[in-house]
Every structure is written in C-alpha cells, then in structure tokens.
Image (cartoon, rainbow, N blue to C red):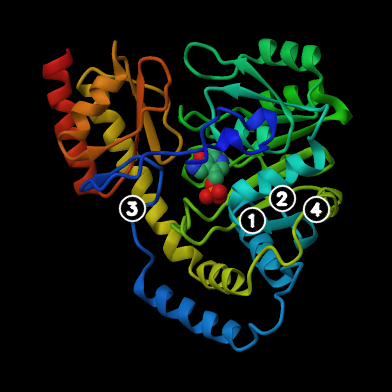
Amino acid sequence: MTHIDDLPVRDELRGKSPYGAPQLDVAVRLNTNENPYPLPEPLVARIAERVADAARTLNRYPDRDAVELRTELARYLTRTTGHEVTYEQVWAANGSNEVLQQLLQAFGGPGRTALGFEPSYSMHPLLARGTNTGWVSAPRKDDFSLDVPGAVEAIRTHRPSVVFITSPNNPTGNAVAREDVLALYEAAGRDAMVIVDEAYTEFSHGASLLELIEGRPNLVVSRTMSKAFGAAGLRLGYLAADPAVVDAVQLVRLPYHLSAVNQATALAALEYTDTLLQYVEQLKAERDRVVEELKGLGFDVTVADANFIQFGVFDDPHAVWRFILDRGVLIRDNGVPGRLRMSVGTPEENDAFLDAAREVKKEFG
Ligand code: PMP
C-alpha cells in the first residue's frame, strides 16, 4: 500500500494529521458546537423554492461576487449591531474556514508568521500550515483570558503578519474585551492584519466588535452561519472589514467559489433571521442553566459566552470524556489540560449530559 510519505508531499505536511473531531454514532452529540435545532420547516420549503430557481440557471456560472448575498449579510450585520455596514465591506465564502484561509493566502504565506493565543480554535494553526505561513502561539492567563501585556510583548517580538483573536474563544468560551482588541491592534501596527474570529458572537452577553472596523483597515471581523443560523451543513462564512480587505481576498479566491445553490440557500436562511435568532435566545438560556448546574455540582466552569461550556478540573480529562461517552453523551476533549468542553444542546440533551456529570462527581470526585 502506498503511504502518504511515499508521495512527494510538501515537507511541512509530512507526519501530520488532518483536522478531525470524532464523528461517532452516539445518541447525544454535544461535541462540535453545532446548533441542536434543525431548520424550521417553512425555511426548508423556502430553501427548496430558492434552490429550484437557482437550478434553472445552473448552466451558467454563479454571481462571482455574490452581491445580493453580501448585501443581505451587510443588512443583517447593520440590524443586529446597530453599526452601518455596506456590501463593499462584506465578503462571503464556504464557511468561515474558507474566509480565514483566503485571509492567510492574501496576508500570510512563506516567510510570514501568524500569531494566536492558545488554547484557541485548532484550525487557525492548520490553516497557517496549509498556506505555508509560520505559526507562533502565545499563552493565556490561568483563567483563559488574554494576557494583554504578554500578548503585546509576543507581537513586538515576532512581528506577525496576521494576529488571530477569537471572541468568544473556542474551546474556552470567554469573550475578549474591546479595549484588549484595541491594545493588540495598536501593537500589531500597519504591517499586520488583526482577525477577530466572531464565529460565536451571537451567543455572547457582550457586543460584537464589528464597529471597530471603522477607520481601522487592518482589522477584520470573521463570522459564520454555522452556529447562530443553525446551518453548519450549508457552509457559509463571511467577513466584515475595510473594502480594501475585500479587494485583497479577491486576489486569491477561486473564481465562482460560492455556488449558486449555496448562495440561494444562504439568502433563504437570511429571510428567517428573526426565527433563527429565537433559537439563539433559547440556547443562551440553556447555557446559563447548565453553567449554574455544573457550578452547583462543584465543577470549575470557565466564563461561558458561546454555545458551549468548558469545565473541569480533572486529573485525567480523557478518562472522564470516555466515562461520559459510555453514558451515551459525546462531548469534546480538546486537549486543554484538566478541562473538557460540552456544546449546549436541547433541554433533553443537556439533562442527559447533566445526569452523566452527576455520576462523574461520584466516580471521580
Ligand atoms: N471559527 C471558530 C472559532 C470555530 O469554532 C469554527 C467552527 N468550529 C469556525 C471558525 C469555522 O466555522 P465554519 O467554517 O463552519 O464557518
């Protein structure tokens, strides 16, 4: 059998593993921060309608610049943040993973470095690797918040071309304060792009950092329809930034990267924004309930501002992960020392998780 290393694969990819959260067939799956609610039936029907329309012209390439979709995304951002955003400031791609990849293709690359504050989203270093961008990791404080003086120091030392700030952060769950982002933006200077990954911002108690893009051409806010819109299967992510950033990513994007079917589906989902945001409210209430219950059981819970909760502290998190899995609940071991992460599900799913958590207390103390 041919092995990957028998192929002339790039040196930096040798011996590496692909991104992979376990996809196990378990009754309660709370491991990938998905929205547990399927799209409502009227929206499913509307998607079918819009996709049928799009199908009638599938012999043609789609709108390469996705102007209608970007206009609706801009309208959504304006409505929900109170900050006026135009379509020229918005760019969309197949999931925010592709948005982030395009940003690294445009602003990273050989001889350049991206910097992140770990533990954070594991795809940031993988996307850096895939685009041949160097990766530097700077630590967080013990409570997983940003160590701002340490972060400024790391930026001054490594002079990165890209700085990732995830708010709320995955997997820890805490949001980053506005003034901390501003301090890092100042430190990074005009030779770096600061990317605020706001994949979970709709679940946060705090405000989006979107308004900070005004007058700050090196700041990018990245968003997704995978979480709040409950459409992880759609693959639609987007960014808001100075129009010059949108011009820059167009230099590296594949022509017609966003299919007509994808654009039609996203437009249908955006028509149902209000309905979908009601699910977000339910999930926030459930998150706060699970946090309180976990604290009541004596777990240490990190500030939870997204649709997931990091908790601990365990001598052997993997053994606890396995123990919970044996009770039919799949959560995530992100490799953060002493901690595990559960994604907030439906009330029934959360109850199943909490039952298992009670047993964990008895078994592991
Ligand atoms: N950013 C963060 C912080 C994430 O956790 C995720 C998904 N888990 C993404 C980006 C990518 O999401 P998508 O590609 O589905 O938009």
Residue 275, position as x, y percentages in the image: 42, 65
User: Mark 3 and 4 residues: CB-CB less than 8 Å, in contact?
Assistant: no
- Find out whether the residues at labels 2 and 1 contact each other: C-beta distance under 8 Å: yes
Q: Distance between the residues labelled 2 and 4?
A: 8 Å
The amino acid beneath tag 2 is Ala
Residue 125 picture quarter: top right
Disc 3 to disc 4, C-alpha distance: 32 Å
Near-viewer residue (235 or 153): 235
Q: How crowded is mark 4: few (under 14 residues within 10 Å), some or many (20 or more)?
A: many
- Real-space Cα distance between discs 1 and 4? 16 Å
Task: Using the image, determine if residue 201 lies above or below residue 48.
Answer: above
Classify residue 15 by image quadrant. top right
When asked about the image quadrant of residue 127, the answer is top right
- Mark 2 Cβ and ligand 1 under 8 Å apart: no
Q: Earlier in the sequence, mark 3 or mark 2?
A: 3
The answer to whether 310 is drawn above or below residue 152 in the figure is below
Question: Which type of secondary structure does the marked residue at label 3 adopt?
Answer: loop
Q: Which residue is drawn at 79% across and 11% down?
A: 157
What number is the disc on residue 36?
A: 3
The residue at which mark 1 appears reads as 77
Residue type pointed to by label 1: Leu
Q: Name the residue under label 4.
A: 246
User: Of the residues tagged 2 and 1, which is closer to the observer?
Assistant: 2
Please tell me which of labels 2 and 4 falls first in the chain: 2
Residue 22 drawn at (x, y percent): 36, 39
Q: Which residue, given by chain and number where applicable, does mark 2 sit on?
A: 240
Residue 43, which numbered label? none
